[in-house]
Amino acid sequence: MFNKKRILCVCCAACVAVQAQNASVTGRVQSSETKKPLQSVNIVIPNMELGSTTDISGKFTINNLPLGNVELEISSVGYRDTTLFVEINNNLVDLGEILLNPEVLHFEEIEVEAHGQLEPTASLSSYSMSGKKIQENMNGSIALTLQNELSVDIQSMGQGTTRPILRGYSGDRFLITENGFEMGDLSQTSADHALSMDIGGVEEIEIIRGPRALLYGSNTISGVINIAKNSIPETQYDHLHTYIISGYNSGNKGLFNNFSIVAPKNKNNFRFSLQNRKTGNQMTPKGELKNTQMNNTESFFGITRLDDGKSGTVSVEHIEMNYGIPGSPEGHIEGVDLKMNKTTQKFNYHQDIDFNNFETFALDQKYINYGHSEFESKDNSYAAVKLSQDIFLLQSKLTGLNKEIGAVIQYRMFKAGGFYWSPNTSESNLSIFGFRQRNIFGLIGQFSFRGEYSIVDPELGLRYSNINSNNVNKKNFGFISISASLIKSWENWQFSTSIMRAGRTPGIEDLFSDGPHLGSYSYEIGNPELKIEQTLGFESSMQYEKDKFFFLLNGFYNNSPNYHQYTKLGGQYVPGADWIEWGSGSTGWLYKYEMQGIKSEISGGEFQAGYKGRAIDITTDFSFVRGKNTSTNNNLAYMPPDKISFLVSTKSNKDLSASIRFKKVFEQTLISKFETQTPGYFLIDTFGSYTFRSDQGTHRLVFQLNNILDETYYNHLSKIKLIMPESGRSISLQYRYLF
């Protein structure tokens, strides 16, 4: 795997003699093209069971080295492997800057495994997937791709609306970001709103927890899902590259195609991509789930210029999604059709600097135009619900050795139409954030903060049916979120503990909604008197890794005295009071849900253990979440059931791999007043890939066989579980071609 042709020889001299077993080697790894520091680079000393990974500044240190010659093997996803021969004849050998050369658009064989490496500067519950692993798990959406990771579950109303649940938290209680910035859609506000991104162009998915999470936003109590796309060329390519992906899924007769091209010109990179995903209705062991089709198209064009420590990118991206939500006995009987479109314009500027120990400066600007419409399935001539928003964002950031500071200005204009009677509302937000890491008495200490001030200004003069118009007025929200952690590492062990105080500003819809929402089968009533949702969270982790064995144990507890939740009104089904009739009388009815603030506790645990052999890897994991409404001493709604899985992966060679996963999801009996129990189930999935090369390029075939036993099962977090079960047996095939 390591490129022996690219061997660098480094010799370091010493002036005085030192003790033989107390030496250290340090250095800082950067990209040879961008001169940016590289995080999570693996540095290994073969046959000595010693190694390290680089932190956010690209720095690494390996301690307890003997005097003499040692060999360092350096590897990172997207870069050519490098070997260094180093002479240790001093207490501390500083290698200075180490440059890695990009491996342009190559199918990476390095897999970023969850918790497979000890990374002292990251929360132990943080992890990522990329390369071959993300390709083999790619399954129609971000949520479906992540569904087998620790404490990740799925909320859905059909295949077009799948969204991840993180440690029992849904909506905007955690962030989903694209290359570090919020998506700019309305997927966090309701289960029927699709995530405005296709999985096809994704290179890496990170789940970030601990103090680093506040760098992305304040509402990050359960973490951040950061999605890295291949849309921004950050290295100077030397020739034209083309990337093609095609895929098919038998479970919905879905077809997926992605075409991408990168063209270099002088110091500029031009990138264009176009992708489409089209599916039929979802197939289940009990038949076809009507009105679950979808058709998504995404296009991108960007220009990047690289020049001596500076880079700038301008890009435009557009996505259109058409998808259906099936009818329900507890909502719109005929179902709902939804149309969504989003256009995003972005500008980024980066420059290397030398200012007060800060080394890079970045300026990001983003403009988003988003539209969302809901139609009765039998009549697409008039949108019953119309939602739109325009977002302008400007962020500046300074990054240095183990520290970061920045500020964000954001303006949002929200508009509602049709029969959805939220007022047109503007929202202005100013955020200041910072992160610091340092050694404290032999421990790694991290601290972060994020101060936010928001002004929510609704349009006045509308009349409402269920809320007091006098309470619909300008709102001001201010809050400071803080987080701190301590990490201790020695030999094969790591321990970490963290605390976070986070605040979530109520959304516009949470405050001022008063109208039918067809896609969510509900009539939504906001609460203009909502206050900031404050949450205090604790987490502790323990990790052990030696030779071929590792295990991880996480525990977390979160307490919120003002947890925002839509609650179903009444219980007697009184017309007008508890529900309203929608349509002609035969099309259905909508139950009333009112936004309320309650006291809540959410806690849980995660365990993972594994063995990495020469030809086979074995991993098992278990996770559980408990949610309590402490205002009434009842269970919180939509808490995921316990689950355990067992994964066996073969590695016959670097070009061929195969895996089989056994997954048991237990019965969910811990339910709220308006929920029903969900039986447990057992699934078997298998997947793998084969890579081969020709004179024209590199080819990769990826296959998945899901639900091999054709199990009839129901997802407790699905709002349509009373209609149909989840997907039955299906085969998914992908073909990737790079030339």
Image (spheres, rainbow, N blue to C red):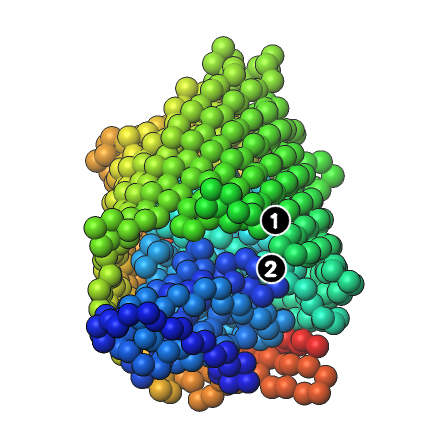
In the image, farthest residue toward the right: 265
> Residue 96, image x and y in percent?
45, 64
Task: Tell me where residue 29 appears, x and y as whole percent.
Answer: 48, 64
Q: For the point 42% across and 24% down, which residue is it?
A: 478
Q: Is residue 212 left or right of residue 654?
A: left
Circles 1 and 2, Cβ within 8 Å, touching? The answer is yes
In the image, is 388 to the left or to the right of 168?
right
Please tell me whether residue 488 is drawn above or below residue 173 in the rendered image. below
Disc 2 secondary structure class = loop
Q: Position of residue 344 (x, y in %)?
A: 67, 45
Assess disc 2: are there few (<14), some (14-19) or many (≥20) residues with their C-alpha within 10 Å of its C-alpha. many
In the displayed structure, does residue 521 sit left or right of residue 120? right
Quarter of the image with the C terminus in it? bottom right
Find the residue positioned furthest to the top. Answer: 470
Query: Dot 1: what SS?
Result: strand
Residue holding disc 1: 350
Mark 1–mark 2 Cα distance, whole angstroms, equals 10 Å
- On screen, residue 606 above or below 248: above
Picture quadrant where residue 253 is located: bottom right
- Say few, some or many: other residues with alpha carbon within 10 Å of mark 1 (under 14 / 14 to 19 / 20 or more): many
Question: Which residue is rendered at x = 63% and y = 59% of the image?
Answer: 234
Q: Amino acid at mark 1?
A: His
Residue 174 seen:
no
The residue at which mark 2 appears reads as 34
How far from the left and from the top, in percent, is residue 383?
68, 36
Three-letter code, disc 2: Thr
